[in-house]
Image (cartoon, grey):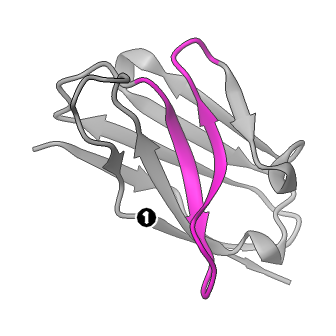
Amino acid sequence: QVQLVESGGGLVQAGGSLGLSCVASGVKFSIATMGWYRQAPGKQRELVADMTRSARTNYADSVKGRFTISRDLAKNTVYLQMNNLKPEDTAVYYCKADPPYGSGYRVLWGQGTLVTVSS
């Protein structure tokens, strides 16, 4: 069964840190880009950060300097280290895995993990 499984969410006070991880299992293709998105109540899902196989990264302006994305290609795992968290970071965080362009495989999404930052 192909799936992305996130872990590491929880409740933290403003200024604190959390680390998220996402493992892709049962995947039959070489994952191109892996990344993290988030969706706060009443808002659209937005990109937080992603990373290509060549380690090129892309961050939302709101998290630059506070969040760090990393990948373990051999383990099909992506991580998100979140520091200096703010209440506005509260959201459900989703992992996403993109197949190679033109491969015909579908994009994969995890089930989401809740991050709550209290003020």
Q: State left or right for residue 88 relative to residue 105.
A: right
Q: x, y percentage for residue 95?
A: 46, 50
76 is higher (above) or lower (below) than 65: above
Q: Please identify the residue farthest to the front as the structure is shown.
A: 102
Q: Amino acid type of disc 1?
A: Gly
User: Is 10 colored magenta in this rendering?
Assistant: no
Q: State which quarter of the image contains the C terminus.
A: bottom right
70 is higher (above) or lower (below) than 13: above
Q: State which quarter of the image contains the N terminus.
A: top left
Please name the residue that numbered disc 1 is placed on.
112
Q: Nearer the viewer, residue 62 or 23?
A: 62
Q: Residue at x 36, y 22 (%)?
A: 100
Helix, strand, or loop for circle 1? loop
What is the quadrant of residue 17 in the picture?
Answer: bottom right
Q: Please identify the residue farthest to the top as the structure is shown.
A: 54
Q: Residue at x 77, y 49 (%)?
A: 60
Q: Residue at x 47, y 66 (%)?
A: 113
Segment tinted magenta in the rendering: 32-55
Q: x, y percentage for residue 22?
A: 43, 44
Q: Nearer the viewer, residue 69 or 32?
A: 32
31 is higher (above) or lower (below) than 12: above
Q: Residue at x 85, y 50 (%)?
A: 61
Q: x, y percentage for residue 54?
A: 58, 11
What is the quadrant of residue 10 in the picture?
Answer: bottom right
Q: Please identify the residue farthest to the bottom as the structure is shown.
A: 42
Q: State left or right for residue 44 relative to residue 5.
A: right
Q: x, y percentage for residue 98?
A: 40, 35
Q: State left or right for residue 38 relative to residue 21.
A: right
Residue count near mark 1 (Cα–Cα under 10 Å), binned few <14, some 14–19, many ≥20: many
